Image (tube, rainbow, N blue to C red):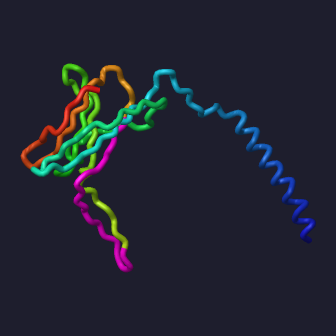
């Protein structure tokens, strides 16, 4: 009986394998070839809380790598909370090309798992690191970082790239 089942199933299995391989040959390749100038820029920042309570941001490193971003982040003014940073990438005249919101790196939210529950706590750090990435554009020459406050946005950092 086992032999009969094997003899009946084996041809079906082989037929299905051969037909799927044949279908794969018909499909167009989904490999995307990157153009020579497709680049992703990573900006690595560090932020430190000063004695007066304000934040001091420094640009630690700029990394350029080949590639293309799959998704561009969309900026939504209602998305950010008080204390979060707004990173703007601009041209020489100040026209904004890219805006991103970064959750406050000095007060990150972490999940705590206990035996009975999962809860979220907000940490208070004295220094932290954060980064952004964007598709390279020769028009982007400046980075500006603002902090969302109750009385509006406070400029923390501005620098030419």
The quarter of the rendered structure image containing the C terminus is top left
Give the left or right position of residue 104, taking residue 112 as reference: left
Q: Tell me: residue 40, above or below residue 37.
A: below
Q: 104 or 77, which is in the foreground? A: 104
**Residue appearing at x 16%, y 51% in the figure:** 82
* Residue nearest the observer in this picture, 99 or 131: 131
Residue at 26% over, 50% down? 103
Say above or below: 125 vs 29: below
Q: Where is residue 140 in the image (x, y as percent from the top left)?
A: 30, 24
Magenta-drawn stretch contains 35: no
Residue drawn at the location 36% of the way across and 23% of the way down: 137
Position of 92 relative to 159 (above/below): above
Q: Does the magenta stretch include residue 119?
A: yes
Residue pushed farthest bottom?
A: 116
Q: Which residue lies furthest to the front in this view?
A: 51
**Which is more toward the observer, 49 or 9?**
49
Q: Magenta segment range?
A: 114-133
In the image, taking residue 49 as reference, residue 105 lies left or right, namely right
Report the side of 98 relative to 81 (left or right).
right
Q: Going by the picture, which residue comes out furthest to the left? A: 151
Quadrant of the drawing holding the N terminus:
bottom right
The percent position of residue 15, horizontal first and vertical second, equals 82, 48
Please identify the dominant SS of the magenta region. Answer: strand
| Picture quadrant where residue 85 is located | top left
Residue 86 position, x and y percent, is 22, 41
Say which quarter of the image contains residue 153.
top left
Residue at x 36% of width, y 79% of height: 116
Residue 113 image point, x, y percent:
37, 72
98 with respect to 158 (left or right): right
């Amino acid at each position: 009986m086992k032999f009969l089942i094997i003899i009946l199933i084996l041809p079906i299995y082989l037929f299905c394998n051969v037909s799927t391989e044949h279908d794969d040959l018909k499909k167009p390749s989904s490999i995307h070839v990157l153009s020579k100038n497709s680049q992703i820029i990573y900006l690595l920042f560090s932020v430190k809380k000063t004695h007066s309570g304000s934040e001091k941001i420094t640009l630690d490193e700029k990394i350029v790598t080949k590639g293309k971003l799959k998704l561009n982040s969309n900026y939504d003014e209602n998305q950010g909370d008080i204390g979060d940073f707004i990173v703007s990438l601009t041209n020489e005249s100040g026209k904004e090309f890219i805006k991103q919101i970064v959750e406050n790196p000095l007060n990150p939210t972490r999940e705590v798992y206990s035996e009975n529950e999962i809860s979220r706590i907000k940490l208070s750090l004295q220094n932290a690191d954060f980064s952004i990435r964007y598709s390279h554009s020769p028009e982007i020459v400046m980075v500006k970082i603002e902090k969302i406050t109750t009385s509006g946005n406070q400029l923390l950092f501005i620098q030419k790239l």
